[in-house]
Each structure stands twice: as structure tokens, then as C-alpha cells.
Image (cartoon, helix red, strand yellow):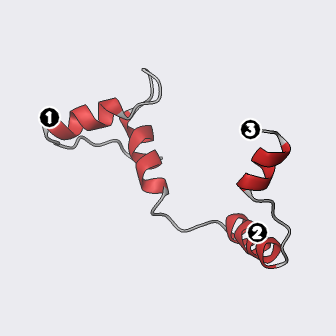
Amino acid sequence: MAMATTIQISEKLMDTLRDRKMYEKESYEEVIWDLLEDTMELSEETKKNIAQSEKEIKEGKTVTLDKIKKELKL
């Protein structure tokens, strides 16, 4: 288990982290992990899903938003 530590941050950053909480009891560690997630390596499963989606797009197995709107009469 990792040892907890204290860091110093500006009041402005603290306010920004507080604003990013999805719920009141969410920890700042959870907020920071959520922010870092986008910069982390994609999992093998995610890479596989992206490759499958790209294949389906190339094969024309997609439906445009305009076509769906038309079918739903939106």
C-alpha cells in the first residue's frame, strides 16, 4: 500500500479541483485520477475496440446522424 502524502497547491487549483468533483464526497485523488486518465496508455481491450470500429467504418457498417434523424422524423 502506498503511503499518503501532502502536496501544496494554489487556492485557484484547489477551487478548480473542487469544481470538478462529480459528487460532494469524491476525494481529490479520484478527481486527479480522472483528469490523468485521458493521458494514460489505452488498454488492449480499448485498442481492440477502436480497431474493430475503424474496420466497421471502412466497411460502411455505419449509419449517419442525418439518416437516423430522417427515420425518426426529427
The quadrant of the rendering that contains the C terminus is top right
User: Residue 29 sits in which quadrant?
Assistant: top left
Q: Mark 2 points at which residue?
A: 53
How far is disc 1 from disc 2 in space, using C-alphas?
Answer: 43 Å
* Residue type beneath disc 3: Leu
Q: Judging from the image, what secondary structure is the residue with disc 1 in?
A: helix
Residue at 54% from the left image edge and 68% from the top image edge? 41
How far is disc 3 from disc 1 in space, using C-alphas?
Answer: 46 Å
Camera-side mark, 1 or 2: 2
For this rendering, which residue is in front, 72 or 16? Answer: 72
Q: Residue 8, percent across and down? A: 16, 42
In this rendering, the count of numbered labels is 3
User: Residue 42 sits in which quadrant?
Assistant: bottom right
Q: Mark 3 points at which residue?
A: 74
Q: Judging from the image, what secondary structure is the residue with disc 3 in?
A: loop
Q: Residue 48, percent across and down? A: 75, 71
Label 1 environment density (alpha carbons within 10 Å; few <14, some 14–19, many ≥20): few
In the rendered view, does 50 fall on the left or right side of 63? Answer: left
Q: Is residue 66 visible?
A: yes
Up the image or down, 71 lies above or below 52; here it is above
Camera-side mark, 3 or 1: 3
* Residue type beneath disc 2: Ser
For this rendering, which residue is in front, 45 or 1? Answer: 45
Q: Residue 37, percent across and down? A: 49, 55
User: Residue 32 sits in which quadrant?
Assistant: top left
Q: Mark 1 points at which residue?
A: 11
For marks 2 and 3, the one nearer the N-term is 2
In the rendered view, does 43 fall on the left or right side of 61? Answer: left
Residue 60 disc label: none
